[in-house]
Amino acid sequence: MPDVLIVVGSDSDKHVADKAVTTLMEFGVKHDLAVASAHRTPDKLDVLIKNSDAKVFIAIAGLSAALPGVIASKTKRPVIGVPVNVKLDGLDALLSMMQMPPGVPVGTVGIDNGKNAALLAIEILALSDKKLKEKLEGKK
């Protein structure tokens, strides 16, 4: 059972996910990585969200970057969005993630910043995990 589920919109976004995976592994956080698109494979995404026991989601996407918002609309667990630089220097994806409607929050980190997404997920998990909190405080 992973504590963090990383979802990328396509295989081309995995280079950003690798940064998150490396950081989560450094802290010993259980995680899974899945490829599911809000547009191309919405049914697969629905199943992933519904069947996941993850405490935090990291959603990595470029272009319209709908993935984090769709995940946030289907769960009350924290969702961290990572915009990917595909077009317009990633600003299109960044603005898409930041402009969520009231009631559908997405915590958004910088463009291509999978490491910060993982660190934010770790900080969220550390609120209820004393050992993880100690690890986090020791690395800062």
Image (cartoon, grey):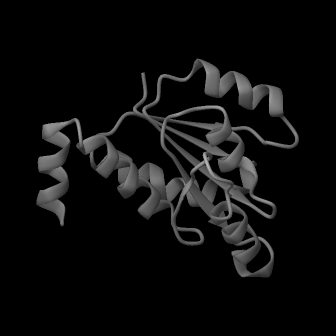
- Residue drawn at x 77%, y 70% is 86
Q: Nearer the viewer, residue 42 or 31?
A: 42
Whether residue 7 is situated above or below residue 76 in the rendered picture = below
The residue positioned farthest toward the right in the image shown: 40
User: Disc count in the image?
Assistant: 0
Whether residue 62 is situated above or below residue 58 in the rendered picture = below
Whether residue 111 is situated above or below residue 124 in the rendered picture = below
Residue 88 in the figure: left or right of residue 22: right
**Residue 12, horizontal then vertical, whole percent:** 74, 56
Residue 128 in the figure: left or right of residue 11: left
- Residue drawn at x 68%, y 48% is 69
- Residue drawn at x 50%, y 60% is 114
**Residue 127, horizontal then vertical, whole percent:** 24, 43
The residue positioned farthest toward the front in the image shown: 102
**Residue 99, horizontal then vertical, whole percent:** 68, 64
- Residue drawn at x 65%, y 26% is 48
To which quarter of the image does residue 92 belong? bottom right
**For the C terminus, which image quadrant?**
bottom left
The residue positioned farthest toward the top in the image shown: 51
**Residue 1, horizontal then vertical, whole percent:** 42, 21
Residue 93 in the figure: left or right of residue 52: right
